[in-house]
Every structure is written in structure tokens, then in C-alpha cells.
Image (tube, rainbow, N blue to C red):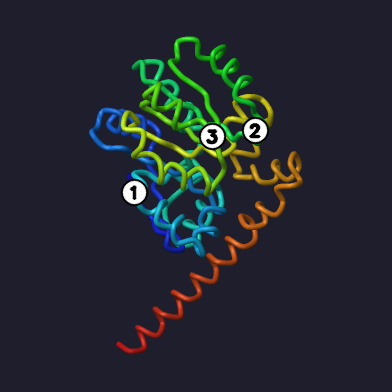
């Protein structure tokens, strides 16, 4: 696993075959592990949100979920590619397979005001993973259901930073849980309420273009990823270049 720092935010890259082993380690450990899936919006938000920054930087694992971060790290000269991304969808699929194979309990937390309704989602998952031991709740009853169900894995789809803050504040209240992940809009993809970008667009890191086309109301959020984030990255590189030049002059 390699660690990078971009605009003060820590992110990791880890091969997918290795992360599966790491997830097994987490599930069998005595500690609880929060995983965040970092995209450019996270990094922009964290610039002015110290609590969110702390949550990301203290997470057990911060995967890269966003082509913009890959491009930014390449801009800083890091040997990294789009294949190093691990999205919320990727993590969810990995954890579902692990849970089915090892009889781990999963609790899904859906947004009560989201597109995907808990009852519909329950039926979708039951049909797709008939051997999975799971429950579905919204944020209003999650702790109550967790107290009864004792999940080992919690997947929270409340949107960032709400989902990540919720996990950070409440994970210790669910002692059975070993892994908790904020997975953003993953449940809407799984339920079919929103279709993923075509594979050709994903391979070029152009999911944002598909999102604009399918969900124009998200334009203000995408603006942070495709305009504000690159601006901050370029500004940071210029600042570092000036600092390095001044240090060389002093020498």
C-alpha cells in the first residue's frame, strides 16, 4: 500500500487483489476500521472543514474514488494510473463477496430522503445475494437495528461528508462492527435507480460527464471537482515551486 498527500489530505493506493486480503485482516482484527473513498469533492470540502479533514486523515484506509485525484498526482510527478482507483462500488462488491463466502453480517444504511427506498433495496439484494446475511435501515433507525443485528460490516450511503462524519461519531456504538465504509451513491447504482457511466467513459475517467448528462442538478457539485479542485492543485504546485526556488537561492 502506498500513501500520498494531496492538498493536505492523505490517500492510499493498493492493488485490488491485496485490498481483498486487507479487508479480511480488518474483519478478523480486534479494532474497528473506517474506510473513506476520497474524490476531488472530498478534498475541496476538507480544505475548510477541519473535522472532515481529520476523519479522512485518520481513516484506516482512504482509497481514491475519482479520476481527478489520479490526474493531480500525475501532475505532481507520481507514478500512478487510473487503474489505481478503488470506488465505493468496487469496495461494496468486494465486501459483499467476502461476506457471502465467510458468513459476515452486513448492515446497509440508506438515506431516508434518497432515491432508493429500503424495502426496494432489500428485495434487490435478497434476489442478487440469496445467501447474504444482511439488514437494511435508514439513518433514523440504524443504531437501533445494529444493536439487534450485530453487523460486522456497515455500508453507509448518506453522501459525503454526512456519511463519513456519521461513521466517525457512531462506529464505537456498534461494537460488533469491524469495517464501516461511506459508499456515496452506490446503492442507487445497485438498485438501478441511477445507471453507471458506460465502461468507455469510466476507463477515461469521464464519469462526471455522464453525471452532468443524467443529473444536471449535480452540476454545482461537479463544478468543485472539475474546476475548483484543479485550480487548488495548480495553485499548490506554483506555491511549492516558488518555495523550492527560494530555498535554492538561500543555499
Circle 1 or circle 2, nearest the eye: 2
The answer to which of marks 3 and 2 sits earlier in the sequence is: 3
Q: Secondary structure at mark 3?
A: loop
Camera-side residue: 6 or 29? 29
Q: Most extreme residue toward the left, as rendered?
A: 30
Residue 18 % position (x, y): 33, 33
| Label 3 close to label 2 by CB (< 8 Å) | no
**Separation of disc 1 and disc 2 at Cα?**
28 Å
Q: CA distance from mark 3 to mark 1?
A: 37 Å
- Image point 40% across, 22% down: which residue? 148
Mark toward the start of the polypeptide (1 vs 2):
1
Mark 2 Cα within 10 Å, few/some/many (few <14, many 20+)? some
Q: Which residue is mark 1?
A: 2
Going 38% across and 41% down the picture, which residue do you hit? Answer: 34
Q: Which class describes the residues within 10 Å of circle 1: few (<14), some (14-19), or many (20+)?
A: few
Examine the rendered structure and indicate whether residue 72 appears above or below residue 247: above
| Residue 196 tag number | 2
Q: Earlier in the sequence, mark 3 or mark 1?
A: 1
What residue is disc 3 on?
A: 140
In the rendered view, does 216 fall on the left or right side of 86? Answer: right
Residue 206 placement, left or right of 94 = right
Viewer-nearest of discs 3 and 1: 3
Q: Secondary structure at mark 2?
A: loop
Q: Nearer the viewer, residue 84 or 212?
A: 212
Residue 233, image x, y percentages: 53, 65
Q: Position of residue 220 (x, y in %)?
A: 70, 54
Image position, residue 182 (x, y; %): 48, 39
Amino acid at each position: 500500500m502506498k500513501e500520498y498527500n494531496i492538498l493536505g489530505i492523505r490517500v492510499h493506493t493498493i492493488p485490488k487483489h491485496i485490498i481483498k486480503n486487507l479487508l479480511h485482516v480488518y474483519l478478523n482484527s480486534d479494532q474497528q476500521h473506517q474506510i473513506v473513498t476520497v474524490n476531488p469533492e472530498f478534498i475541496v470540502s476538507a480544505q475548510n472543514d477541519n473535522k472532515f479533514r481529520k476523519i479522512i486523515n485518520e481513516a484506516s484506509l482512504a482509497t481514491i474514488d475519482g479520476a481527478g485525484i489520479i490526474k493531480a498526482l500525475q501532475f505532481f510527478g507520481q507514478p500512478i494510473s487510473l487503474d489505481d482507483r478503488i470506488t465505493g462500488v468496487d469496495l461494496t462488491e468486494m465486501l459483499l463477496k467476502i461476506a457471502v463466502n465467510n458468513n459476515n453480517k452486513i448492515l446497509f444504511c440508506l438515506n431516508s430522503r434518497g432515491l432508493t427506498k429500503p424495502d426496494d433495496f432489500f428485495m434487490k439484494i435478497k434476489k442478487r445475494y440469496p445467501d447474504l446475511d444482511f439488514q437494511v435501515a435508514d439513518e433514523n433507525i440504524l443504531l437501533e437495528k445494529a444493536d439487534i443485528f450485530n453487523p460486522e460490516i456497515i455500508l453507509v450511503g448518506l453522501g459525503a461528508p454526512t456519511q463519513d462524519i456519521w461513521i466517525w461519531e457512531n462506529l464505537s456504538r456498534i461494537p460488533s462492527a469491524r469495517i464501516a465504509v461511506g459508499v456515496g451513491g452506490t446503492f442507487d447504482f445497485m438498485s438501478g435507480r441511477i445507471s453507471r457511466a458506460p465502461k468507455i467513459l469510466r476507463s477515461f475517467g469521464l464519469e462526471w460527464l455522464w453525471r452532468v448528462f443524467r443529473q444536471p442538478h449535480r452540476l454545482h457539485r461537479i463544478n468543485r471537482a472539475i474546476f475548483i479542485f484543479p485550480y487548488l492543485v495548480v495553485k499548490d504546485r506554483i506555491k511549492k515551486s516558488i518555495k523550492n526556488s527560494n530555498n535554492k537561492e538561500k543555499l
